[in-house]
Each structure stands twice: as structure tokens, then as C-alpha cells.
Image: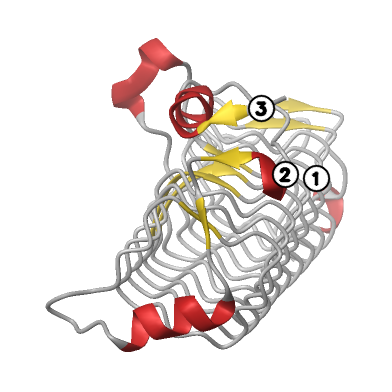
């Protein structure tokens, strides 16, 4: 399927997941080499950041490149190698990074609105302070820093369908989501073993089938969350607010710390150890 730039952006913005075309079929996207990208960012300055809007960078090795502050919105990074790349404060709105390699990359304060990151590798990456709405299904975020993020659903665009952070089947083992807002995010069937979610806003988030084994959710907000077949084995649920949450087939609460937790069904509560 051949997609123009405009049709691709419209499809993504309206929440329709379409089959992305191969690199050679990105009509209207200028294909750049690593050398061209490096030259563009080296010629930039804080007052005149690099403009790499709607470029085709798929499968390019961009490891270690310093993009800080650049406009790379609507660009294609599918399959690109971005290990240790610096993307702090970058505009990544409606960019495509499906299957991209971003281990230990820095995306602090980046604008990641309507981003495609399905199947990407963000292990040990730093997304602190980023704005995130997009598709991260099956992404690897193990040991990633996701603190102080705004990843809450965009409630202004309900006419286009719920635009939120989608992380089903993602790997978040050892990740730190503390002090972030992931309200209405989809974590279904994701692995958050040993993750840190201290004071995290998870209002109406979906954790159906998710693993929260050994996770620390102290002081987090899970009001009206979907907790179906969720595994809380050895989790720290101290002062968590579960008011209005849906509990069904939940596992591991008998080994979890629930001191001060609110909204737990009476049949599931237990004395603090």
C-alpha cells in the first residue's frame, strides 16, 4: 500500500493503525543518510535547532547522534539504530519509530504526541519529563526512566477516539514510572515486574493480564482502574487508592503489602505484615 505523507498522518492521528509502507515507498519523505543528519544537527544552535521534519531515516544507523531540540516531527525512524542518541526536547509529534533501537537513548522533555513505537527497544532509555501519547505495544522499556511524564490520555480529542498511551504486551521490568501521569493508559498484558510506580497517576488505567510482581506502587492512584487477572504478588500497595477499581481474577494480593490502601474489596483485603 502506497501512502502519501498527508494520508499517513491523517490515518495515525485518527487512531487507525495501518500497515506502514516499506522505506522505498514513503512518498514525499526525503531519504537522508547518517552523514546528512549529522551535518544538519551540527549546523544547528539552541536558537536555530535542526529542522528534520518529514524525513525518511528508516534503517539508518544514528547511534550516538545529538538531536537535542531538533524538530523531527512526522519523520520515519522505523528500524533505525539510535542507541545512546540524544533526543532531549525534540519534537517527535506523529513520528514513526516502529522497531527502532533506542537502548540508553535520552528523550528527556521530548514531545512524543501520536508517536508510533511498536516493537521498539527503549531499554535503559530516559524519557523523564516527556509528553507521551502513542502506540508502544510490545515495546521493550526494561529499566527505562519514565518519571515526571505526562502520558495521560488527551481528553480534548474524544471525537477522534481516545488518544492515550498504549502499552499492551510491553516489557517494563525494573522501569521507573514514579511521579508520572499515565491516566487511562493501556498496560494490558504488560510485564511490570519490579517496576517503580510511586505516586503515579493511573486513573482508569487498564492492567488486565498485567504482571506487577514485586512492583512498588506506594501512594499511586488506581481509581477506577481495570484489574482483571492482574498479578500483584509481593507488590507494595501502601496507600494506593483503588476506589471504584474493577477487580476480577486478581492474583497475589495475599502476599502484597496493603497498608493504608483504599478501595480494596473486603474479600481481598488482609492485615499488613
Mark 1 or 2, which is nearer the eye? 2
Q: Residue, x 66% and y 27% (percent of image)?
A: 2
Asked if one can make out residue 135 in the rendered structure from this viewpoint, the answer is yes
Q: Is residue 139 above or below residue 195?
A: above
> Mark 3 and mark 2: span between their CA atoms?
24 Å
**Residue identifier under label 1:** 169
- Residue under numbered circle 2: 137
Instruction: Give the structural element (helix, strand or loop) at label 1.
Output: loop
Please name the residue shown 48% across and 69% down the image.
Answer: 127
Colour setting: secondary structure
As drawn, the residue found furthest toward the top would be: 159
Tag 3 residue? 2
The answer to whether residue 266 shows anywhere in this view is no
Seen from the viewer's position, the closer of residues 181 and 270 is 181
For the residues labelled 3 and 2, say whether their Cβ atoms are less than 8 Å apart: no
Horizontal arrangement in the rendering, residue 208 relative to residue 239 (left or right): right
From the viewer's perspective, tell me whether residue 243 is left or right of residue 124.
left
Amino acid at each position: 500500500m502506497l501512502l502519501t505523507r498527508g494520508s499517513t498522518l491523517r490515518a495515525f492521528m485518527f487512531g487507525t493503525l495501518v500497515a506502514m509502507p516499506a522505506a522505498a515507498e514513503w512518498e514525499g519523505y526525503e531519504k537522508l543518510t547518517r552523514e546528512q543528519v549529522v551535518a544538519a544537527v551540527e549546523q544547528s544552535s539552541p536558537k536555530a535547532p535542526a529542522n528534520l521534519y518529514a524525513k525518511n531515516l528508516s534503517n539508518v544507523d544514528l547511534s550516538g547522534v545529538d538531536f537535542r531540540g531538533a524538530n523531527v516531527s512526522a519523520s520515519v525512524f522505523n528500524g533505525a539504530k539510535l542507541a545512546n542518541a540524544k533526543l532531549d526536547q525534540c519534537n517527535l509529534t506523529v513520528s514513526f519509530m516502529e522497531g527502532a533501537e533506542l537502548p540508553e537513548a535520552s528523550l528527556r522533555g521530548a514531545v512524543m504526541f501520536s508517536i508510533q513505537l511498536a516493537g521498539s527497544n527503549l531499554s535503559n532509555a530516559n524519557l523523564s519529563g516527556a509528553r507521551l501519547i502513542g502506540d508502544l505495544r510490545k515495546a521493550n522499556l526494561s529499566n527505562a526512566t519514565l518519571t515526571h511524564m505526562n502520558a495521560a490520555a488527551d481528553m480534548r480529542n474524544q471525537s477522534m477516539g481516545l488518544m492515550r498511551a498504549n502499552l499492551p504486551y510491553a516489557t517494563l521490568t525494573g522501569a521507573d514510572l514514579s511521579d508520572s501521569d499515565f491516566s487511562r493508559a493501556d498496560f494490558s498484558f504488560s510485564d511490570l515486574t519490579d517496576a517503580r510506580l510511586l505516586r503515579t497517576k493511573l486513573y482508569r488505567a487498564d492492567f488486565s493480564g498485567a504482571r506487577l510482581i514485586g512492583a512498588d506502587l506506594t501512594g499511586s492512584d488506581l481509581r477506577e482502574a481495570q484489574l482483571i487477572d492482574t498479578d500483584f504478588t509481593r507488590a507494595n500497595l501502601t496507600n494506593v487508592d483503588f476506589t471504584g477499581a474493577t477487580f476480577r481474577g486478581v492474583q497475589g494480593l495475599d502476599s502484597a503489602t496493603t497498608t493504608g490502601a483504599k478501595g480494596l474489596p473486603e474479600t481481598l483485603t488482609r492485615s499488613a505484615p
